[in-house]
Image (tube, helix red, strand yellow):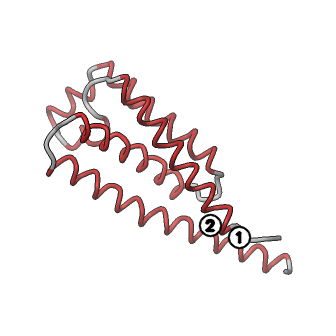
Amino acid sequence: MTRDGASASVAATRRARRFGAAGLLALTVAAGLLVHTLLPDTPATDIAGDALYAAAAYLAVVFIAPRLRPLAVGAIAATWCVAVELFQLTGLPLAWGAMFPPVMLVLGTVFDARDLVIYVAAIALAAAVDAVSTRRTRPRD
């Protein structure tokens, strides 16, 4: 394959990864909203919501930077999720959510250490799936 052909193939792969991430992100957000609004508040729905939030963070990073490898995407997504969870210790997300409830969907309300474990596990799973998927679709030089 010529150098221009390889460049075009890489660009097409990144475009496909970005569009795939956008579609999966939309589905993940929709699933998260359904869990949040339609299901009773239980430990299981809380865990599901946390896992969907982490998956959405991962997919958002892929959408923004499709050239990043899964490990880097996972590190960025995990940093975001952990930072948001630690920010809840300030009480600001709870106060802001009381004034404007949609804020709670992005920043949560109160700190829960269990959330940190769920975020890391969900992001590790997303990165593993992404790594397998990316390996299969990466153009050969």
Residue type at tag 2: Arg
On-image quarter of the N terminus = bottom right
Residue 133 lies in quadrant: bottom right
Where residue 113 appears, as percent x and y from the top left, is: 37, 22
Q: Is residue 133 left or right of residue 1?
A: left
Location of mark 1 (residue): 10
Q: Is residue 118 left or right of residue 72?
A: left
| Closest to the observer, 68 or 123 | 123
Residue type at tag 1: Val
Q: Residue at x 42, y 62 (%)?
A: 24
As helix, strand or loop, the secondary structure at mark 2 comes to helix
Where residue 46 appears, as percent x and y from the top left, is: 26, 37
Residue 88 lies in quadrant: top left
| Closest to the observer, 8 or 42 | 42
Location of mark 2 (residue): 14
Where residue 118 appears, as percent x and y from the top left, is: 41, 35
| Closest to the observer, 56 or 44 | 44
